[in-house]
Amino acid sequence: MTRKSIIGRIMIVLGAMLITAALLLVAYNFYHEAQSRRSMEQVLGKLTAEIPDEPQEDTDESSPFDVFDRDEIKNDSNEKNDEEDPFIEIDGRKYIGLITMPALGQEFPVIRGWSYDDMNVAPCQYSGTRADRDLIICSHNYAGFFDSLEELRSGDEVIFTDLNGRRYTYEISYTELISGWDGSRMLEGAKTDWDMTLFTCTWSGYSRVTCRCILKDV
Amino acid sequence: MNKQRSTCLRISGAFLCVFAMMLCMFNCIILPVHAAQTDICIVGKIQDKGIGGVSWKLYAVGEKAADGKYVLTGDFSDYPVSLDKIDTASEAVNAAGTLAAYAEVDGIKPLSEAVSDEKGSAVLSGAGKFVYLITGSVVIDGDTKYIPSPMLGEFTDAQLGGDIININAKFSAEDIEDESSEYGVEKVWINADDRDIPESISVEIYKDNELEETAQLSAKNDWKYFWEGDSKAVWNVKEKNVPDDCTVVYKEAETVFRIENTYADDSTDESSESTSETSSKPSDESDDSGNESEDEKTPPDSSNNESGDTHDDSKEQVTSEGSSMTPDNDSSKPEQVTGEDSSSKSEKDDDKDSATADENSEKSDSKSADSKDSSSKSGTGTGTGNGGGTTNTTLPQTGSLWWPVPVMAGAGLLLMAAGVRVSRKKEN
């Protein structure tokens, strides 16, 4: 066997290995995404069961003067804690509500705070709060997650349902691509340009597909 | 004789020179500090639309005493309000609201007064080296009542050195649903554990600055009083005969008022301060005082008044441009209290809504820096604060690893093709 023949065969083997690695990566991604989707569906079922169909007002407010205690919590919001945002704990994770995208026919639970582990289960509250009109929700672009976010168009509705069953209807104002290194731009314009933001990675992972939403109706 | 005369002349000349030099030094160093007065341009907007017709008033309410503490001065000096126990944004908001209520009800003459034009801007003159209070009148447009938040703070030397100080006012808006509403006032005693509180107190209720009635609050009516009143009127309350060792805070939200009388805390350990109220409602005030530091405090700027901004389902939340800052990420300089200086708004846009002061903001800044660190290191975030401490960080990676797939597959195919070609070449 000549030297050139050996080189040729090595190249074929290496090429086959690369193709196999690509296929394995595809398989892993599909498996991982399917697992995440299953977890999310389970949580979604549990969370939907917990959220009342009819909106419920806070029942603990027995006096008109309770507004002061509510405001004090808001004013001293430097240290927001668990008491401020209502949440439901499911499987060790805290959920603050549901996000519904009628245009895509999708609904997601929203986890309070974010971590990479949490994002494998559901979209996460990256920053801000609904009440402060600067809520930013991030999610993986897995199939069944925010993979179709870029298909949303201006005027499409996005609904945030809180744990009391109150539905806050937002309208997509505009969509933009933000560099993954530009965290400050993601936060820009809260309250003035948008009231809620959804984002996920582009396919390359370099940028973030970002949907800015304006509160339309409660 | 001539010699003596010339000596006298020389000596007096020398004295004159020394006197002239001292006068120059006095002019250069002392006078500008006290004489520095700058105009304030205050702008009130709601979603780019200016709010005209707001009567803005500037008051000098206090100053920094020689011992570094802030004290009330002038017409405000006798009011039972403490400027020196302001550590949080909400305490500053409360102090501003209380002093504004006193100023309004007692008709204190402001330093300067101006009505905003249709663009929402008004110019107040006379800003100086004092603790200021800026109040604005309520404006009714159709069925909406726009309520400007009073602001309390201190101008920095840099601000006073400039031509004009720009302040973005903050408004809350309330829908007027009915012609009349039920109003209420509640009395709360704080730190009253072992003290003999009065059996009852008198509260004057003012409608458009005219005394409407005087209500008696006592344990019999659970220290509460309610009345029906014109929804479009401006209502205020004032407690008569405040006990000597109490400070007072007036709070107002929606259609209710709360008057808090806080007795001086005898305990030196403020973290163990206990709060007791005769009312059924607890107060969070004692929580805030837990982290007090007595050294060189500066009262937080109250221009970040959020009490009226609470977004309720029944209440439209409106903020002015300048209110896009949060206490979390205050960029105000330490040791200085500033208004919502719009000249630095662009820097603050990222930081959103803020107008707390030094200590508070330092705490906040370090907190947000901490969370920023934790965010970038561990790839997690609380997501609960405004901004979540994630400013200027990289955004989380929110996708599967797909890009290596075509790269590896393409490279593999190329390698295989090249390998086949090399092998065939040999065979040929």
Image: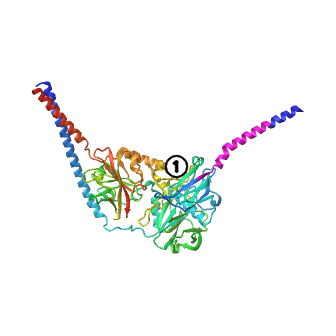
Q: What residue is shown at x 19% (from left), y 46% (from top)?
A: A27
Q: Position of residue A50 (x, y in %)?
A: 30, 63
Q: Is residue B28 magenta?
A: yes
- Residue B29, percent from left and from top: 66, 43
- For the point 56% across and 68% down, the residue is B237
Q: Chain of mark 1?
A: B
**Relative to B37, residue A44 above or below:** below
The residue that disc 1 covers is B343
Colour scheme of this structure image? rainbow
**Quadrant showing the C terminus of chain A:** bottom left
Which quadrant does the N terminus of chain A fall into?
top left
Q: Amino acid at mark 1?
A: Ser
Nearest the viewer among A88 and A29 is: A29
Q: Residue furthest right?
A: B1
Residue B420 image position (x, y, % from top left): 14, 32
Q: B32 or B343, which is in the foreground? A: B343
Q: Is residue B130 visible?
A: yes
Q: Residue furthest top?
A: A2
Which one is in front, B42 or B245? B42
Region of the chain picked out in magenta, as a range: B13-39
Tell me: residue B98, above or below residue A6. Answer: below
- The image quarter containing residue B268 is bottom right
Report the side of B4 relative to B215 (left or right): right
Instruction: State the predominant SS element of the stretch in magenta.
Output: helix
Indicate whether residue B15 is drawn in magenta: yes
Residue A112, by quadrant, is bottom left
